[in-house]
């Protein structure tokens, strides 16, 4: 009996130690405890502290941060193939069919331009150059696959459970999951984060659009060149794709219904498209597609209407790429079942400043959330901050103001803060001052490239200290330049700060520190000298 008593005491001690280990980092572990009457009771009410639905940039950042803070976390991620059957791995839009492959293909196109410039610098280059799409595509796709694997390894290292499953809400704490084989299971969580992002839209009113066209979900995974391409739309996705296709020497046309780069500064948008036209991209302005038909030859015949003349036109293309917007990926989530409020117009989830939905323990971040910038870095930052708030480590909210961004068109465009139009709307035209300059990058000089669209604009309040409201830059490495200056917006950047900054010579970025001509003055803003 004494031996039995000592054995029971050891078991109790071991169980107590196990409980301490599991609760040391505030993790609720499903450990079974020994009770006085020898029955087993669950230690935790839920399977997980946090379940994130969506394995894109925001969802992965939130899940890994929460796990680092001691939470028991699972991520559900399942990619429905595109209408063309394109599918990819973990990482979301940015890694697989967005920022990463886009930037790599943009770089490939820039290299083609650099080779042409090289002749003026003395390099002996063959007269005819050609681009091999399969070689580039394989290299880009291999890099993307390496990132997919890297994300899986990171989840494992940080003790985040990865479930390659679709998820839908049964109630505010329970998620039904289903895998590729149709096997179902349920998981429960104290908190749930929706981070499913968005997918490209097809124009449902255009016959043949979905049947014969592709989207950005497909273009980066094509094994062969798209050849002669019609890009429908004028968003940054449309212009970026059209830009690198033109750079590869492909016959590329952009069809624009209204304006380019809606939501961006329209003067800057005009400079971007002007440069693209000079670069070789064709534009069909104020036109809208009517139908797409596949000819016996395999070519696609597109019929469209010129909105100015009301005339119909036709042409044939090898590829039609639709870039007419994105829709939040919420169809299978069953959000209404648990009372989550949706903006009926946009289809996005309505969220509070703390990313909370109308159901207190369910949150939404990234492209799925109403009123949030559709940008990878904002989703990542919002996800990390949310993780800290969920464990009570912080009350800091995501600041969505003055987030810098760049458009990777042949002539890059970077911006942070307000457009000139938005500054006028908020403060009145008489209350703002716009400093600007047309400049020539030194890199363009020997190559004798046209620099008439290389432009800088800084929008300020006219008050004494002239706080900077918006900064806009077209030119080489616009994203790098804008990223650096965006820091100033977090510190109350003023025009005086810019003027007191000593530039690095010779760079394009230094022109921002030399701005001295206002639009109001009417003086020539062309930079002369070095």
Image (cartoon, rainbow, N blue to C red):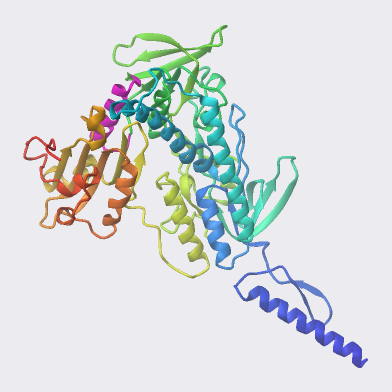
The picture places residue 443, in percent across and down from the top left corner, at: 26, 35
State the residue in front, 39 or 524: 524
Q: Which residues are magenta?
A: 262-283
478 versus 485 height, above or below: above
**Residue 33 position by quadrant:** bottom right
Which residue sits at x=45%, y=33%?
105
The picture places residue 136, in percent across and down from the top left corner, at: 51, 30
**Residue 269 position by quadrant:** top left
Which residue sits at x=24%, y=30%?
446
The picture places residue 484, in percent across and down from the top left corner, at: 30, 52
Q: Residue furthest bottom?
A: 2
Q: What's the magenta bit mostly, secondary-structure-wise?
A: helix
Which residue sits at x=42%, y=35%?
107
Q: Residue furthest top?
A: 296
Residue 449 visible (yes or no):
no
523 versus 3 height, above or below: above
Q: Residue furthest right?
A: 1
* Residue 317 forms part of the magenta stretch: no
Residue 84 visible (yes or no):
yes
């Amino acid at each position: 009996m004494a031996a039995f008593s000592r054995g029971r005491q050891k078991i109790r001690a071991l169980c107590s130690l196990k409980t301490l280990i599991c609760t040391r980092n505030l993790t609720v572990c499903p450990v079974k405890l020994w009770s006085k009457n020898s029955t087993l009771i669950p230690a935790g009410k839920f399977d997980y502290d946090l379940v994130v639905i969506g394995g894109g940039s925001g969802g992965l950042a939130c899940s890994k941060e929460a796990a680092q803070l001691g939470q028991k976390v699972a991520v559900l991620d399942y990619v429905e193939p595109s209408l063309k059957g394109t599918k990819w791995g973990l990482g979301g839009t940015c890694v697989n069919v967005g920022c990463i492959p886009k930037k790599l293909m943009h770089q490939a196109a820039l290299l083609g331009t650099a080779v042409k410039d090289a002749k003026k610098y003395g390099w002996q280059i063959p007269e005819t150059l050609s681009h091999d799409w399969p070689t580039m595509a394989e290299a880009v796709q291999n890099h993307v696959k390496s990132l997919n694997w890297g994300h899986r390894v990171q989840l494992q290292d940080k003790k985040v459970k990865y479930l390659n499953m679709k998820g839908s809400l049964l109630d505010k704490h329970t998620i039904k999951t289903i895998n590729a084989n149709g096997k179902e299971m349920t998981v429960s969580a104290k908190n749930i984060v929706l981070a499913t992002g968005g997918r490209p839209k097809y124009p449902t009113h255009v016959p043949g659009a979905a049947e014969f066209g592709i989207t950005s979900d497909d273009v980066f995974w094509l094994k062969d060149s798209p050849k002669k391409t019609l890009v429908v739309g004028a968003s940054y996705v449309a212009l970026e794709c059209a830009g690198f296709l033109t750079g590869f020497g492909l016959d590329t046309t952009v069809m624009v219904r209204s304006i380019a780069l809606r939501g961006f500064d329209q003067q800057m948008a005009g400079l971007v498209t002007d440069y693209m036209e000079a670069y070789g991209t064709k534009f069909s302005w104020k036109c809208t597609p009517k139908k797409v038909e596949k000819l016996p030859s395999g070519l696609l015949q597109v019929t469209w209407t010129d909105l100015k003349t009301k005339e119909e036109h036709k042409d044939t293309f090898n590829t039609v790429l639709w870039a007419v917007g994105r829709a939040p990926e919420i169809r299978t989530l069953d959000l209404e079942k648990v009372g989550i409020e949706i903006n009926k117009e946009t289809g996005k989830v309505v969220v509070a400043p703390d990313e909370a939905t109308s159901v207190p323990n369910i949150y939404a971040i990234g492209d799925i959330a109403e009123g949030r910038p559709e940008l990878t870095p904002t989703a990542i930052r919002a996800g990390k901050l949310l993780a800290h708030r969920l464990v009570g480590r912080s009350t800091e909210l995501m600041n969505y103001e003055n987030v810098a961004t760049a458009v990777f068109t042949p002539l890059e465009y970077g911006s942070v803060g307000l457009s000139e139009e938005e500054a006028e709307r908020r403060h009145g035209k008489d209350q703002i001052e716009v400093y600007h300059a047309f400049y020539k990058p030194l890199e363009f000089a020997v190559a004798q490239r046209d620099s008439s669209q290389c432009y800088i604009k800084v929008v300020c309040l006219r008050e004494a200290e002239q706080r900077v409201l918006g900064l806009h830059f077209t030119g080489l490495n616009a994203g790098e330049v804008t990223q650096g200056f965006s820091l100033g917006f977090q510190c109350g950047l003023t025009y005086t700060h810019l003027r007191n900054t000593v530039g690095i010579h010779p760079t394009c970025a230094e022109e921002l520190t030399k701005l001295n001509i206002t639009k109001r003055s009417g003086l020539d803003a062309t930079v002369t000298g070095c």
